[in-house]
Image (spheres, rainbow, N blue to C red):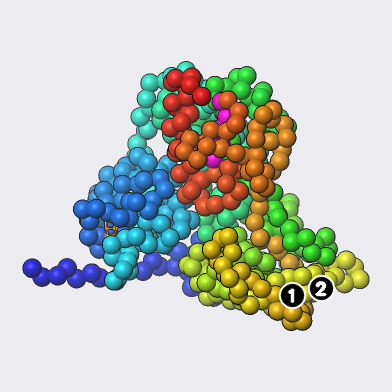
Amino acid sequence: MAKKIIPKKTPMPEQPPGERVKNFNEVPYGYTAEQAMAEAQRCLQCAKPLCMTGCPVNVNITGFLKLVADGDFRGAINIVKETNSLPAITGRVCPQEQQCEIVCALAKRFEPVAIGRLERFVADWEAAQVDLPIPQLRTLTGKKVAVVGSGPAGLTVAADLAKMGHHVTVFEALHEAGGVLVYGIPEFRLPKAIVRREVEYVCSLEVKLVKDFVVGRSATVDELLEEYDAVFLGSGAGLPWFLKIPGENLSGVYSANEYLTRSNLMKAYRFPEYDTPIARGRRVITIGGGNVAIDASRTALRLGAEESIIVYRRSRDEMPARAEEIHHAEEEGVQLMLLTTPVAIHGNENGHVKELECIKNELGEPDASGRRRPVPIKGSNFRIPADIVVIAIGQSPSPLIPKTTADLKTGEDGVVTTDNETGKASKKGVFAGGDVATGGATVILAMGQGKKAAKAIDEYLKTGQW
Ligand code: SF4
């Protein structure tokens, strides 16, 4: 029998680097219907599809790819939505290359099927249709669940519980729903309109959304438990870490959280049309090696920086950011200064940042994370001029909810202690998932935890067993 010829992965059209660096519009344009069908036809429809073992929310990948290949996009999106309520978001921001695509049967000898791009395609295809199907709800159970936070974990729990027939109210502290999806991820990677569309879908399942409501201030978890049968904490990790080096209080030093929130959520890039300003520097240095650092460095270029430099203490191989994001950033002109650790920030006479003092590293033995440890090279200190320094080294959950909730146990860095399989917290009726329970992971892992918690909450509501 003739061997099947596997064509190359279908490229996705995108804005050229020189153009996109001057605007905040989304970088890739997405597949056309013809491109999507061609890409889906590369799938081998494996009898034992390894791709599905790599998906934290168990999307029926072979099922939806088959329908895309046949041009049945309605059928394909319906399959995706059986397990994933936010496909336009996951299709854009999931690290597929480390999940479903890395284990794709084609990956060893060829390029894997572009599963994420196809997920995005079917979600966008559906949004473009005028005859959106009305979701079918199950019989109402009369049980009420409060979901704290409208990020990926909260939205997933809310959608799943609503589909199970429970009354769900989502409490969001900010004036816009989406959590990290709107305040953290820039417009050019995940347009706000896409998040709004997915939030609208969740609300179409009769989920009630209450904005500007800070749980821990507007009402405590204990007060919510008087009205609701269960509470899910999906309040994320919004407390930024700092380096604890001299000079971090100088003007012009931002946490990535503040820098990105100002730009993304408060639209500081359109100041004075919008109220929130943001400092714009000629030379912006971002410290960190994850996706947040990449987002901040690319944002700096769009805000007009002539130079945007990432300072990271290990080598490129250890950078936690997605390879595709690093590639996009470098294409746009972001420079990587690797094996470099900041030791102090120096200011000018007005108290504004002027220079970042760093030390060079070499790589030592692997540490607890499995990545090779950076070892400082004695006497290698040097200084880099800087107008703005953005610190993007991680974050933990806000202490507000644990402080105001009786008997809620937390672990290292204020992470809410939960059972891995069910999301049950230490307090009866309280569940948690996403960054508040992990300290910071990916959107899809947060959604995976949301799904597990929804099942466990449903079980608890039915049986009353804790
Ligand atoms: S592993 Fe790859 S080729 Fe096989 S079914 Fe999944 S996407 Fe298709």
Instruction: Tell me which segment is drawn in magenta.
Output: 429-433
Asked whether 121 or 402 is in front, the reply is 402
Report the side of 397 relative to 168 (left or right).
right
- In percent of width and height, residue 99 lies at 41, 57
- In percent of width and height, residue 93 lies at 48, 56
- Identified by mark 2, the residue type is Lys
Which of discs 1 and 2 lies nearer the camera? The answer is 1
* Residue 223 lies in quadrant: top right
Secondary element at tag 2: strand
432 within the magenta span: yes
**Quick one: label 1, few (<14), some, or many (20+) residues within 10 Å?**
many
Cβ atoms at labels 1 and 2 below 8 Å apart: no
Asked whether 438 or 184 is in front, the reply is 438
How many marks the image carries: the answer is: 2
- In percent of width and height, residue 369 lies at 56, 60
Q: Tag on residue 220?
A: none
* Residue designated by label 2: 354
- In percent of width and height, residue 154 lies at 53, 38
Residue furthest right as drawn: 349
Point 65% across, 56% down: residue: 394
* Residue designated by label 1: 358
Point 24% across, 53% down: residue: 48
Secondary element at tag 1: strand
**Quick one: label 2, few (<14), some, or many (20+) residues within 10 Å?**
many
- Identified by mark 1, the residue type is Cys
Magenta span: predominant SS is strand
* Residue 373 lies in quadrant: bottom right
Point 74% across, 61% down: residue: 243
